Image (tube, helix red, strand yellow):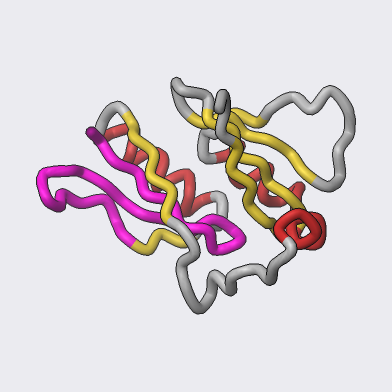
Amino acid sequence: MKELWINLPVKDLRKSSEFFSNIGMEIMDQGQENNQMIGMVVGDHQVHVMLVLEERFKRFSLNDLADTNQSTEVLFSISVGTREELDETIGKVKQAGGFVFAEPSEQDGLYGAGFADLDGHRWNLLVM
């Protein structure tokens, strides 16, 4: 096994792409216009996260989508370098229309915060 791609269903590809770009994620150059999915690169290890329109995602997964308004399907954790970077990113999340479900705070010896993106996928930022 060489690489990991995480596929996330989204309702509006353009809005989701703008949201993640606005909070500092690197959007991959697709080389051509793609109206069904777009990729992001996260972190030094270059984990690929693919934002996929819901209907296409359902065709890949052969399963119904989780209702992110009712439950959490997964929690993505991302380390950041400093408390200031974490605080700044959470500010960007709020400005971009995301939902902060856990304001920045110290818990169990870690400084962290949590937010949901436009489609309700939950993300956790931590200073390690």
Q: Foreground residue, 34 or 60?
A: 60
Q: Residue furthest front?
A: 1
Where on the picture, by quarter, is residue 40? top right
Magenta stretch containing residue 34, yes or no?
Answer: no
Residue at image coords 30%, 27%: 81
Magenta highlight range = 102-128
The N terminus appears in which quarter of the rendering? top right
Above or below for 102 versus 81:
below
x and y, in percent, of residue 17 in the image:
68, 43
Where on the picture, by quarter, is residue 26? top right
Q: Residue furthest bottom?
A: 70
Query: In the picture provided, is 105 more to the left or to the right than 44?
Result: left
Above or below for 113 versus 62:
above
The C terminus appears in which quarter of the rendering? top left
Magenta stretch containing residue 108, yes or no?
Answer: yes
x and y, in percent, of residue 122 in the image:
46, 57
Q: Foreground residue, 79 or 103?
A: 79
x and y, in percent, of residue 123 in the image:
43, 51
Magenta span: chief secondary structure: strand
Above or below for 41 versus 110:
above
Query: In the picture provided, is 104 more to the left or to the right than 28?
Result: left
Residue at image coords 69%, 67%: 63
Residue at image coords 42%, 55%: 75
x and y, in percent, of residue 99 in the image:
47, 61
Tally of numbered discs: 0
Residue at image coords 86%, 38%: 34
Q: Foreground residue, 60 or 116?
A: 60
